[in-house]
Amino acid sequence: MIIEELVLSRADELSRPELIESLEATAEAARSVAGRSQERRRKESLDRAERLDRVIHFLKTDSLAPGSDLADQALCEKLREKLKARGQW
């Protein structure tokens, strides 16, 4: 599942604190996979963890993390809208 789908689908089901906890666990799992994988898979897992970290930063601080790109910004805005609609922002 791509990051956008993962984050937005979980935002439909979880409260903001639960979402943060879930994404932190997912990022940690990606780092764990990266530690024992071949180079290509390692980079993909680290990239996934880093992107999740940027989303988590946004959820915690309501500001984009350093290194965020336009795709991160768009995802975070969608996430904010979803959570606002559910009274979770």
Image (cartoon, rainbow, N blue to C red):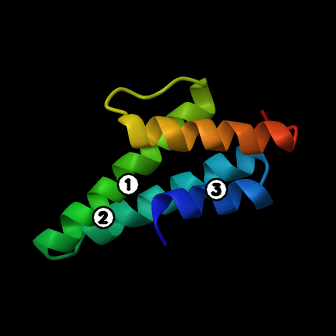
CB atoms of marks 2 and 3 within 8 Å: no
Residue 72 at x, y percent in the picture: 44, 40
Q: What residue type is labelled 2?
A: Ser
Mark 1 and mark 2 in contact? Answer it, CB < 8 Å. Answer: yes
Which residue is painted at 53% across and 23% down in the image?
Answer: 63
- Give the spatial CA distance, label 1 vs label 2: 6 Å
Q: The disc labelled 1 sits on which kind of residue?
A: Ala
Name the one closer to the observer, 44 or 32: 44
Left or right of 57: which side holds 66? Answer: left
**Residue bearing the label numbered 1:** 49
Q: How crowded is mark 1: few (under 14 residues within 10 Å), some or many (20 or more)?
A: many
User: What's the residue at 58%, 25% (across, down)?
Assistant: 61
Q: Quadrant of residue 45?
A: bottom left
For the residues carrying marks 2 and 3, which lies nearer the camera in this image? 3
Local secondary structure at mark 3: helix
Quadrant (top left, top right, bottom left, bottom right) of the C terminus: top right
Assess disc 3: are there few (<14), some (14-19) or many (≥20) residues with their C-alpha within 10 Å of its C-alpha.
some
Mark 1, secondary structure of its residue: helix
Marks 3 and 1 sit apart, C-alpha to C-alpha, by 16 Å
The furthest residue to the left: 39
Work out how far the residue at label 2 is from the one at label 3, CA to CA, in angstroms: 19 Å
Of labels 3 and 1, earlier in sequence is 3
* 2 sits to left or right of 38: right
Q: Can residue 28 be seen in this view?
A: yes
Q: Which mark is residue 45?
A: 2
Q: Mark 3 points at which residue?
A: 8
